Image (spheres, coloured by chain):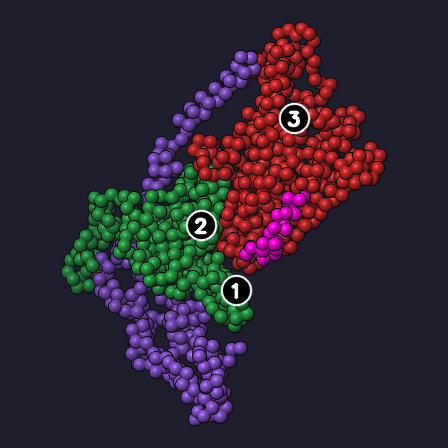
Chain colours: A red, B purple, C green
């Protein structure tokens, strides 16, 4: 049966006739989830550089590569969603300067090229030059090309690398804030939709991005260390868990603020939105986002990590602690994905007439289907593996320049 | 300048040149002429095919029908409301003929009783109103005066009649309160029925000393909400509302 | 009115029978004549071919009198005919809503197939306080949020006040559909681009009326040029108290409703 016919049958109340078809589906949920991870991973990396948090140093390069992997895959979700992806370049040729979406194309390009790629390049340049000297074949050529021919590794040159890198990180932090805050603004600026239209959405998006990014790095670091058979750097994981806790507290406070504010002001849309939350979004919002995705990790991290007390409120042995951290991180991923779902899909499940609710029929196959999105969620990991192969982020791969360094 | 800077600047310069070239070749020629859009799009939209000719077009050939129709009750109803899009017919009048709805299914789209339709709009119950007969057997669609003037007010004032029929005023004929000239049935919008103007009218039945059947409710005209007209609170067609 | 016999193939004996004979006999000649002259009856009535249409001289709007709408759905049907809109009940450039406000204060709204085919579904079974039909369509806002959000300039407002979509430029991102507060837009499943009411731009630029206005049997829809003092719309906005939909969003709609009820969103 025509899926829209099925949706029409399940409508409760009144929706505008054109609202039967839900326009932004699973792909548009995946997209802010992926870009959120980018922003979060990068901000974590920046903590190392700018605030000199030495404990999380082992994750620095890994975080940069993770950010790049997710940044490369995220636009794919958008392209697959467009009615005419072959015309997508029009955004760069004739952008509408009043459109948040158009301007975001430039923010994204800026972030990718001027911030992330540049920072990775500056950080790895020396290593690429030195690796190329010992390698053969494709990998050698890849590294040489990537250096763009800048093979000078004299102390002056390296000093430039370091200070330029620091400068890039400095502008990178607000850029990362802008990146995911902007995605929030794309929703938050839509005055037609009372679920989206809010001053807080960009801020909530940003902090939930930070939360998801840190949680992702915790998982990736943990898993990569186990897979490589290396000992887990526990102070690093403790620090990550601490930052995760703090970020989660801020994120939770912001979401509570939004919630309380809505209930208190009780604008006209409160009736249909309450119905929305307690009927269509009960599982994804109350169970997954709020309880499993926020409250449980807060309790876990708060009691086990050094965030609130130096040795943790519950003093647990390392093995158990890091398992709980990993568990909390996984719950957070589910929670943040649900957050994106609740914003994107939730905002379309109620009618702009404020009189009815509809449903979202998720497909299995096809570009908008579950399998495609699952693949898009998996793809960045594969890209990350490739990046790790080309630009190994491990401490032991890092090259040190013998004095004097020759060209 | 360090080697890094020069290489990066080179890459940046290449990007700028590349994007400018792309802009030059890829942005459509008419973009930006009249605003931030392709002006050619407006021209393309203006050339879309026309399907409805408009009633003035029918008047070019069908002068008699249009003249008759223009004086009658359906004068605000365009020809194409019933005959469908006819622009093709104006291009090829003898080859393409617009259909004419002749079944009972069509007229009730407008004239079937629906309480949401404005009061006074002529409505019938399609099931009970002369069943089986085609509407056009009694009503000429171009001059649809009913074959004889309706006897009941409910023929046009359906919702009022239905409300009254289940109310305490059910036994009262409409003319009890509304003095209606016969002409109202023929040109309803030109000649209107009268309406009661003062409390005393209702008092004629409902005052304490009124000479009316005993079962009628009585009130004291002096003290009962004397600053208001009766129908400011009581809907006369269904007066028992709480 | 103009002499109806001007410019038509029917310009022979006045009697209707001989006109029919004429048509019968020369049934081939008429369309050939028309084709040869490349004038259709429609175009013959339109503005003189010499005077080119200047968009700057016009600014279009529409008036809707809620108390006149009988919910027959002819407008929604004609729109789909005129503009080749897919017939499924998920794609509408214009539609009619029915509001039934009960004595208990509950309001029921419905729009079965946009009102096409009438409202055959039973009116909600309750004591009715007020009830009416409301035609809806793109409000052709002066400050359109859909134009604001389009990333590429595929939707835009023309100088004569009509918001159009460039089907060959739209990338199908659907942001405009999200941004419209009135639910006026949809994605055309065939072209995968945004689609909406155009005030029948291809008609009004030739002096014709939009299809929905043409077929409205009660004159509930009134079309006009806001730059003209002598248009039906000018009279409409003079003699009626006007409301627009969702005024708090400041989109400055150009569809003006008379007798609009507070319950309408």
**Secondary structure type for disc 1:** strand
Q: What residue sits right under mark 3 in the picture?
A: A50
Q: Chain of mark 1?
A: C
Q: Residues within 10 Å of mark 3 (few under 14, many from 20)?
A: few
**Secondary structure type for disc 2:** loop
Give whichever of A357, A252 is nearer the camera. Answer: A252
Residue A197 shown left or right of residue B45 in the figure: right
**What is the spatial separation of the Cα atoms under label 3 and label 2, in whole angstroms?**
44 Å
Magenta stretch bounds: A252-276
Residue at coordinates 61% horizontally, 12% vertically from top-left?
A157
Give whichever of A383, A326 is nearer the camera. Answer: A326
Circle 3 or circle 2, nearest the eye: 3
Give whichever of A111, C201 is nearer the camera. Answer: A111
Disc 1 with disc 3 on a shared chain: no
Residue A269 highlighted magenta (yes or no): yes
**What is the spatial separation of the Cα atoms under label 1 and label 3, in whole angstroms?**
59 Å
Q: Residues within 10 Å of mark 1 (few under 14, many from 20)?
A: some
Q: Chain of mark 3?
A: A
Q: Chain of mark 2?
A: C
Residue C107's label in the rendered image is 1
**Secondary structure type for disc 3:** helix
Residue at coordinates 49% horizontally, 62% vertically from top-left?
C263
Q: What residue sits right under mark 2 in the picture?
A: C250
Residue B212 shown left or right of residue B88 in the figure: right
Residue C234, image x, y percentages: 31, 57
Residue A209 shown left or right of residue C192 in the figure: right
| Relative height, residue A259 to residue B163 (above, below) | above
Q: Residues within 10 Å of mark 2 (few under 14, many from 20)?
A: some
């Amino acid at each position: 049966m025509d899926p829209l016919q099925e949706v029409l049958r399940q409508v409760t109340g009144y929706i505008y006739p054109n609202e039967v078809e839900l326009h932004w589906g699973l792909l548009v949920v995946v997209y802010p989830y992926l870009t959120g991870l980018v922003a979060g991973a990068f901000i974590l990396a920046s903590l190392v550089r700018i605030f000199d948090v030495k404990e999380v140093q082992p994750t620095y390069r890994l975080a940069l590569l993770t950010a790049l992997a997710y940044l490369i895959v995220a636009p794919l979700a958008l392209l697959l969603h467009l009615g005419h992806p072959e015309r997508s370049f029009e955004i760069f040729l004739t952008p509408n300067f009043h459109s948040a979406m158009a301007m975001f194309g430039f923010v994204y390009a800026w972030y990718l090229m001027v911030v992330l790629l540049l920072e990775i390049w500056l950080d790895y340049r020396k290593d690429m030059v030195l690796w190329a000297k010992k390698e053969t074949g494709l990998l050698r050529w890849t590294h040489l090309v990537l250096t763009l021919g800048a093979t000078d590794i004299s102390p002056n040159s390296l000093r430039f690398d370091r200070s330029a890198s620091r400068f890039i990180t400095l502008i990178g932090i607000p850029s990362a804030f802008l990146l995911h805050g902007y995605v929030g603004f794309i929703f938050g600026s839509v005055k037609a939709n009372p679920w989206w239209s809010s001053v807080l959405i960009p801020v909530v998006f940003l902090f939930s991005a930070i939360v998801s990014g840190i949680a992702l790095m915790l998982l990736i670091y943990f898993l990569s260390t186990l897979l490589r058979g290396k000992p887990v750097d526990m102070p690093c994981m403790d620090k990550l868990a601490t930052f995760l806790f703090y970020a989660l507290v801020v994120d939770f406070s912001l979401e509570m603020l939004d919630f309380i504010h809505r209930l208190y002001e009780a604008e006209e849309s409160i009736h249909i939105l309450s119905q929305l939350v307690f009927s269509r979004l009960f599982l994804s919002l109350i169970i997954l986002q709020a309880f499993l995705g926020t409250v449980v990790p807060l309790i876990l991290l708060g009691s086990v990590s050094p965030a609130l007390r130096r040795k943790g409120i519950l003093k647990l042995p390392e093995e158990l602690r890091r398992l709980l951290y990993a568990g909390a991180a996984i719950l957070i991923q589910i929670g943040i994905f649900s957050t994106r779902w609740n914003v994107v899909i939730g905002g379309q499940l109620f009618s702009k007439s404020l009189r009815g609710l509809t449903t979202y029929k998720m497909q299995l196959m096809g570009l908008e289907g579950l399998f495609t999105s699952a693949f898009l969620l998996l793809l960045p990991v594969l890209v990350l593996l490739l990046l790790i192969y080309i630009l190994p982020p491990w401490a032991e791969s890092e090259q040190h320049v013998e004095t004097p360094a020759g060209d | 300048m360090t080697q890094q800077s020069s290489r990066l600047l080179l890459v940046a310069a290449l990007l700028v040149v590349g994007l400018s070239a792309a802009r030059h070749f890829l942005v459509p020629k008419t973009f930006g002429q009249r605003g931030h859009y392709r002006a050619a799009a407006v021209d393309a939209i203006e050339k879309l095919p026309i399907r409805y000719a408009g009633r003035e077009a029918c008047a070019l050939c069908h002068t008699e029908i249009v003249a008759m129709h223009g004086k009658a009750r359906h004068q605000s109803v365009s020809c194409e409301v019933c005959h469908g899009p006819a622009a093709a017919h104006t291009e090829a009048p003898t080859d393409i003929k617009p259909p004419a709805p002749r079944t009972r299914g069509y007229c009730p789209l407008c004239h079937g009783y629906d309480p949401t339709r404005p009061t006074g709009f002529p409505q019938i119950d399609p099931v009970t109103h002369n069943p089986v007969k085609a509407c056009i057997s009694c009503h000429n669609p171009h001059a649809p005066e009913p074959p004889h003037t309706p006897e009941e007010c409910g023929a046009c004032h359906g919702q009022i009649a239905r409300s009254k029929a289940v109310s305490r005023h059910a036994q009262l004929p409409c003319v009890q309160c509304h003095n209606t000239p016969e002409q109202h049935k023929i040109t309803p919008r030109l000649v209107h029925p009268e309406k009661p103007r003062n409390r005393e009218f209702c008092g004629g039945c409902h005052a304490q000393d009124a000479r009316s059947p005993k079962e009628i409710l009585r009130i004291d005209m002096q003290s009962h909400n004397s600053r208001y007209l009766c129908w400011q609170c009581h809907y006369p067609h269904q007066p028992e509302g709480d | 009115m103009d002499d109806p016999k001007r410019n038509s193939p029917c310009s022979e004996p006045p009697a209707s029978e001989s006109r029919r004979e004429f048509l019968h006999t020369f049934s081939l000649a008429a369309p050939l004549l028309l084709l040869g002259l490349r004038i259709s009856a429609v175009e013959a009535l339109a503005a003189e071919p010499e005077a080119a249409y200047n968009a700057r001289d016009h600014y279009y709007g529409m008036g809707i009198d809620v108390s006149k709408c009988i919910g027959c759905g002819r407008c929604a049907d004609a729109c789909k005919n005129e503009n080749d809109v897919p017939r499924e009940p998920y794609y509408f450039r214009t539609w009619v809503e029915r509001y039934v406000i009960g004595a208990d204060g509950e309001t029921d709204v419905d729009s079965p197939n946009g009102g096409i085919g009438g409202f055959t579904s039973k009116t909600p079974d309750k004591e009715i306080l007020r009830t009416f039909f409301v035609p809806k369509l793109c409000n052709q806002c002066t400050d359109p949020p859909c134009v604001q959000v389009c990333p590429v300039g595929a939707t835009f407002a023309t100088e004569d006040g009509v918001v159009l979509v460039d089907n060959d430029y739209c990338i199908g991102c659907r942001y405009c559909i999200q941004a419209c507060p009135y639910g006026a837009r949809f994605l055309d499943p065939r072209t995968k681009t945004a689609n909406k009411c155009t005030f029948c731009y291809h008609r009004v630029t030739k002096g014709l009326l939009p299809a929905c206005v043409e077929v409205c049997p009660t004159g509930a829809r009134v079309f006009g040029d806001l730059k003209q003092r002598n248009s039906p719309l000018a009279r409409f906005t003079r003699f009626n108290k006007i409301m627009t939909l969702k005024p708090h969003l400041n989109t400055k709609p150009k569809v003006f409703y008379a007798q609009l009820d507070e319950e309408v969103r």
